[in-house]
Every structure is written in C-alpha cells, then in structure tokens.
Image (tube, rainbow, N blue to C red):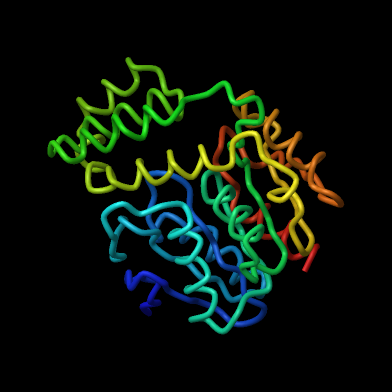
Amino acid sequence: MGIATSADGTAVSFSTTGDGRTVVIVNGALSLATDAAPLADALVTTGFRAVTWDRRARGASGDRTGSTPDDEVADLAAVIAAVGGTDAVLGHSSGAVLALYAASHSVPTGALFLSEPPVDFEGTGFGQDLADRLQTLVDADRPAEAVAIFQIDAIGIPAEMVEQERARGQLAALAPLAQSTVYDTLLTLRVRQPDAELLDVAGPVTVLRGAQTFPFLIGSSDRLAAEIPGAELVIVPESVMHRPDPAATARVIADRL
C-alpha cells in the first residue's frame, strides 16, 4: 500500500498489483478499494498492472471539511503521479463520472473506460438540497440515515429495500462511508447537463454498459458515447444490473490497449 498526497494535503491510500501497462480503477459510490479487487485481479490476469485506491472520506484515505469535486480530481491526479503515470483509467458509476471530469481538467488519464456513468443529461434528478440534507445528517452524527437517504434519493433504491438493509445491519456497515455520499452527490451535480468542454476530452473514450441494467444508466451511457467525439459504446452482456463483470471488462480493455 502507498500514500499519495493530494493538492490540499489529504492522504490518499492506493495499492498496485501486477506488471504491464497500468490501469487505475476508480470506484463508484459506497465502495472501497477492496471492492475493486475482482476487477484488479482480472486486469492482472490479462497482463496489466492494476491500481486501486480509496477515494477521500473512504477507508484508509483522509478527508478535509468542505471537499469539492475538484479536490477529488486532484486526488486522482495524485494517485496517477504516485504510480508513475497510467495508460488508462477505468471508472465505474460515479467513478466513471470522476474519471471523465478529471480528464476534462487535463488530468493525464490515458484512455478512458467509463462503466455505466450516471450523467443526468436532462437535469431532472436530485438537486443541491440533497447534498445539504446529507451533510446535515452527517454533522448530526446520523451516518446510517445519510446512507439510507442517499440510496433512496440519489440511487433510486426503493425505501422498503433500504429498510431491509437496515434490518440486516447493512446500513450500519456502510455508515463509515456517509461523508462520501455528500461528495458523490456534489460530483454528479457538477457534471449534470454536461457542456462541450466536459465532453471534449483528449484520448480515446470507451463507454461500457450491461445489456441488462437500469434504464437511466442505459440512456446515460448511450447518450454519453454519442456525444463525446469519437467515443465507442460497448455493451457487455456479462455485466448485469450495474455490476461490471471483471473478466469481460478486462477483455474490453485489453482489446483496446
């Protein structure tokens, strides 16, 4: 495990495994670097060096009060620099949004592989009030409630399913990630209704999605691939309901790198 120091001094924990061309993995909401281990293992098996890391306010990484999407961009840049550069960035869900946002701010991401990015092209989803509500709950020491509200209002999980998670202790297990839900909300808001600058990124872009996934993510993925000049849309049948299949995803990357 290594530590990269972000521009604001925040410590960002990362790990590398394997040899070969480098792929940095950027996780989605409510996940840790360890959750990317199956993707990393598949990339290593395919001949790559994989980098996993904890985004700020998660796991072994630090945080700073009032962090913004630009701070998360700086975190990714710091990890890329610490590992000696990268050939590609693989982002899933909000991690794909962060990868795209970072590339649009001249972070040297190499090739972009964006897995089911939740980009709100129509601007009809949640607003700033959600980020404010989540931060209020975190500040009031109600982290499990913040996670529940994020799952219902941001992700769209039915309230009854969230209550089942609460009964099984899953909300309590996710409570340490509550502050990160604020950051994921702010990040998603920052890239809603993306402008030409955000969509005009250097390097090749591949958007991946499953054949069976949530309708919003089908629309978002397909439209993003259509609006980024030269981007490619790849449908990965093995990836089901917003869960990227590690082996199939690694093959898509190997075929293009």
Q: Is residue 246 left or right of residue 135?
A: right
Q: How many marks?
A: 0
Q: Is residue 24 above or below residue 190?
A: below
Query: Horizontally, is 243 left or right of 56 in the view?
Result: right
Q: Position of residue 58 (x, y in %)?
A: 32, 56
Q: Looking at the image, is 36 positioned above or below residue 11?
A: above
* Vertical side of 2 occupied by 209: above or below: above
Q: Position of residue 159 (x, y in %)?
A: 34, 17
Residue 145, given in percent of the width and then of the height, sits at 22, 30
- Based on the displayed image, in which of its 4 quarters is residue 86 positioned? bottom right
- Quadrant of residue 67 in the image? bottom left
| Residue at (37% x, 29% y) in the render | 130
Horizontally, is 3 left or right of 242 in the view?
Answer: left
Of residues 109 and 49, the one drawn nearer to the viewer in this rendering? 109
Quadrant where the N terminus sits is bottom left
For this orientation, the residue located farthest to the top is: 160
Extreme residue in the right direction: 230
Q: Residue at x 68, y 49 (%)?
A: 198
Residue at 45 percent across and 29 percent down: it is 155
